Image (cartoon, coloured by chain):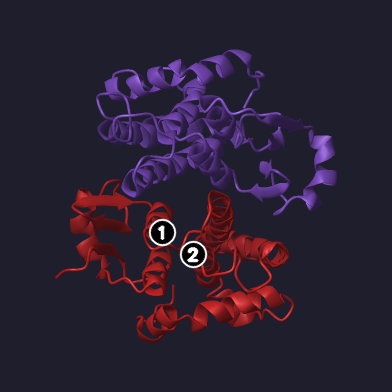
Amino acid sequence: MPAYKLTYFNVRGRGELIRLLFAAGEIPYEDVRIESDNWPELKPKTPMGQVPILEVDGEVICQSMAIARFVAREAGLLGKTHLDQARADMLLDGGIDVGKLFEEMVMEKDASKKAEKKKEFGEKTLPPFLALYEGFAGDNGYFVGYSLTWSDIAFFNMMDFITAEFPSALDGYCNLTKVIKIVKRVPGIAKWLKERPITDN
Amino acid sequence: MAPKYKLTYFNARARGELVRLIFAAAGVEFEDVRFDYEQWAAFKESTPMGQIPVLEVEGRTMCQSLAIARYVARETGLCGKTSWEEAQVDMFVCGADDLLTKLLNVRFEKDEATKEEGKKGLATYVPNFLANYEKLCGPEGYLVGTSLTYADLAFFEVMHDILKVTTLDQYPKLAKVVENVTTDKGVSAWLAKRPDNPS
């Protein structure tokens, strides 16, 4: 088996999807978490001056989604056909668009601007997105076909962040609630959720 | 017989051109539908997420420009030969898309002050991007491996406006990538006939 080493900050952020995929696939890996103080020294050694990075048997890649997609493939969670894989990609990318707006809101330092962004997100952005994705999720609790793919896990991860600010966001969405339930019960993920370090974001 | 693939986008390059370049490089025919804003307004409801580009194939429709590009690249063998090569190709395409997003944001920004700030940001971002890509580029003028992948096409496309004001003299490997892309049989034929759009 190859030796996998993930390096990121001690946060969930852009690394957690990757960690969840390693967990789902029950693939052992080194989960390196660096302190901000150590980052300036590491930065020039990375491919594009960013983390997360993944080292596999001495070779390195960056870009969180490229890494996640690679690990999803290693874990057999990409999707069975090219069209299934494309559907998973499409749903993930649609989620990322919304995730970016959520991130902007969380990172906003000005208190009144943040409150405004939160209201806008909670009333104008999130509901149509969830309604759309409720339609995309099958009533069997999978976004693609009839089995788990990384798009289910990515949705779970995103909602993990979002429900911290909007706890009742998924009320009334039966299919989406099923997706979350199924992901949490994947043995590797259930174990990881119990063991993972608790971080603010 | 109608082509297997139908791409619908605006009459622009922006987030549609990478897919068109992949079809061109692969020598695969596709229906290249270009909407104006009126046609778009009528079509919007029928798209998966209220956005274009969309790709229709075998009666199914998908959206999200990178998801479409990746699918077409996989179907046409332009996404890397091994799992690791695919990951490297992905890395380069995602990085190019980060830059494309910044470029498009500046281009379409209406507020002058924000636009100027964006341009200033690009003045440091672009040289850094090029230095990284030069360092990571393969030795034969392909970002990954020893033949054209859609990473090379994504790099070429994002450089479209930048190459009007910068040369790649400092970046010989990247200059070779651009040369390999523009001399590719399918791509050069496409570049000769594609509509000339400002963005």
Q: Could you say where residue A175 lies in the image, as x and y percent from the top left? A: 29, 24
Position of B29 with respect to B170 (left or right) is left
Name the foreground residue: B174 vs B159.
B174
**Chain letter for the red colouring in the rendering:** B
Q: Could you say where residue B57 lies in the image, as x and y percent from the top left? A: 24, 56
Task: Indicate the chain on which mark 1 is placed.
Answer: B
Tell me if residue A147 comes above or below residue A64 in the rendering.
Answer: above
Tell me if residue B179 comes above or below residue A143 in the rendering.
Answer: below
Name the residue tied to disc 1. B69
Name the foreground residue: B136 vs B32.
B136
Name the residue tied to disc 2. B150
For the residue carrying disc 1, how many other residues have a C-alpha within 10 Å: few (<14), some (14-19), or many (20+)? many
Residue at x 14%, y 70% (from the top left corner): B1
Position of B182 with respect to B72 (left or right) is right
Q: Could you say where residue A42 lies in the image, as x and y percent from the top left? A: 81, 45
Q: Amino acid at mark 1?
A: Ala
